[in-house]
Image (tube, rainbow, N blue to C red):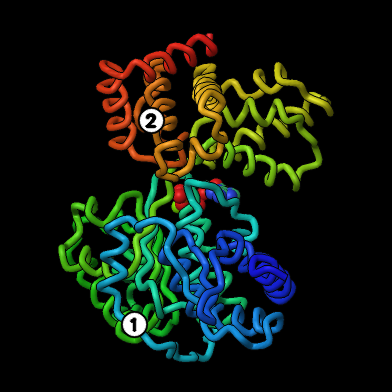
Amino acid sequence: MNDKTIWLKTLDNIKNILDPLPFNTWFSPIEFLDIKDEKLRLVVPYILYKEHIEKIYKDLILENINKFVNNSIKDVSFILKDNLDSIIKEELEIKEEKNDNLYETESHINFKSNLNKSYTFSNFVVGESNKFAQAAALAVAENPGTMYNPLFIYGNSGLGKTHLMHAIGNYIEEKQHKKVLYVTCDQFLEDFMGLSRKNNNDNLDYMEIFKEKYRNIDVLIIDDIQFLGGASASQQEFFHTFNNLHNNSKQIIVSSDRSPEDLKALEDRLRTRFCWGLQVDISPPDYELKVAILKKKLKGEKIALDDDIINYIASNVGNDIRQLEGSLTRLVAYSCIMGETNPNVEFAMEALKDFTKKPVTDQNNIRRIQKSVANFYKISFEDIKSKKRPPNIAIPRQVAMYLCRKLTDEPFERIGIEFGGKNHATVMHSCNKIERELKNNKELQEAITAIEKELR
Ligand code: ADP
Ligand code: MG
């Protein structure tokens, strides 16, 4: 057996031991490097994977691989594929190691977690734009209060923040029987002001009730923290709640529609605290993720839809996943009312005309350009959208971005999304670079002319 086969056999063993969710999340991105000096060396995409796998699964890996090699492997090392985003790296550096000492708390009779059971990891579809957030969420769910505290999830509306937070809460409640409290920011403010009590004439001490509710828990999830706003008394109270929980190694999870740096109304000391842990963002879904989500949602419906209808929805309905779901519900309802069991694209167009403002096929155009460029340079379609940096991939990618900009009306942001979630600046930089190069580089000029010709 060669070393790679040994690793594949080990993986097979582990697959039989673990649930599919942790296995797929943590083990499928691992690449085998080699076995050297009694050490197995594996490559992982992000530091989060490295830390988490090291902490949780290292022994399992060792134990299983040693079944095939006569206990000759003494250690495993995990090597990072790419340098991590500098911000996240910084955060990880200032992160303090905490020991796993979550206090067991007895459950309260009237305690309500407010968790929505239908938001789970298993029905959260993972793609380029949300895979880091999903992995971070699962890491926290598997190990609350220890590594990434607080976890700060941000991104535009409708991209799955609330879903992920409930998934974490449900997971912790189910697997670890810890006490989880989910509240929206509004609920927190209301509780703080004692407004949720109907009877204001009783003698209850609202502050005590508040503290009882917010400090006697293992996990606090607060959604849409951007609404904490400028009210300084509530910020102060949130600050105390935060410190109290954090000092006791209780997990805090916060979501917002923007990054902590952009939460202008927030006091600096709160902003600083949000940066103690890990910040992850969710970007708008690309075409593939939209298709995957639609297919997943369709599984529960009575009606089957052809791929061309799914492709039509994915290309023409915007990036808000709520709208994507809405369009599907609408189409299913419309089909039932009209007694249409096998709708075609024209039918879908009619049913969804409120969802599709303009008949955009630009997303298709971007894909066409990506495919042509990949073809021309003989690399794969996946590579062109990836984060890989070798020049034989990076240059075609820049050419493709340049052509998207030149041949479609799409803004830099949109192009970035279709190239695996690159930001606006990266796309702009690529386009400028190719433009400059074109002036003197004959080979590049010919390549671009050839690709454009093919696209026409
Ligand atoms: P946000 O809180 O970011 O505004 P939500 O979590 O409320 O977004 O998501 C909006 C809707 O889209 C929810 O119904 C959610 O279940 C669904 N959704 C979002 N992302 C995904 C995903 N990756 N897989 C499946 N459903 C998703
Ligand atoms: Mg939300």
Please say if 160 is above or below 152. above
Judge whether residue 306 can be spotted in this image. yes
Examine the image and state in which quarter residue 411 appears.
top left
Identified at 46% across, 56% down, the residue is: 132
Q: Which residue is denoted by mark 2 in the rendering?
A: 398
Amino acid at dot 1: Glu
**Frontmost residue, 454 versus 195:** 454
Q: Position of residue 243 (x, y in %)?
A: 26, 79
**Mark-to-mark CA distance, 1 and 2:** 40 Å
Marking on residue 353: none
Amino acid at dot 2: Gln
**Frontmost residue, 116 versus 132:** 132
Q: Position of residue 6 (x, y in %)?
A: 68, 71
Q: Residues within 10 Å of mark 2 (few under 14, many from 20)?
A: many
Q: Position of residue 58 (x, y in %)?
A: 54, 79
Q: How many marks?
A: 2
Secondary structure beneath disc 1?
loop
Identify the image quadrant of the N terminus.
bottom right
Q: Position of residue 309 (x, y in %)?
A: 70, 27
Q: Which residue is denoted by mark 1 in the rendering?
A: 97
Q: Residues within 10 Å of mark 1 (few under 14, many from 20)?
A: few
Secondary structure beneath disc 2?
helix
Please say if 226 is above or below 41. above
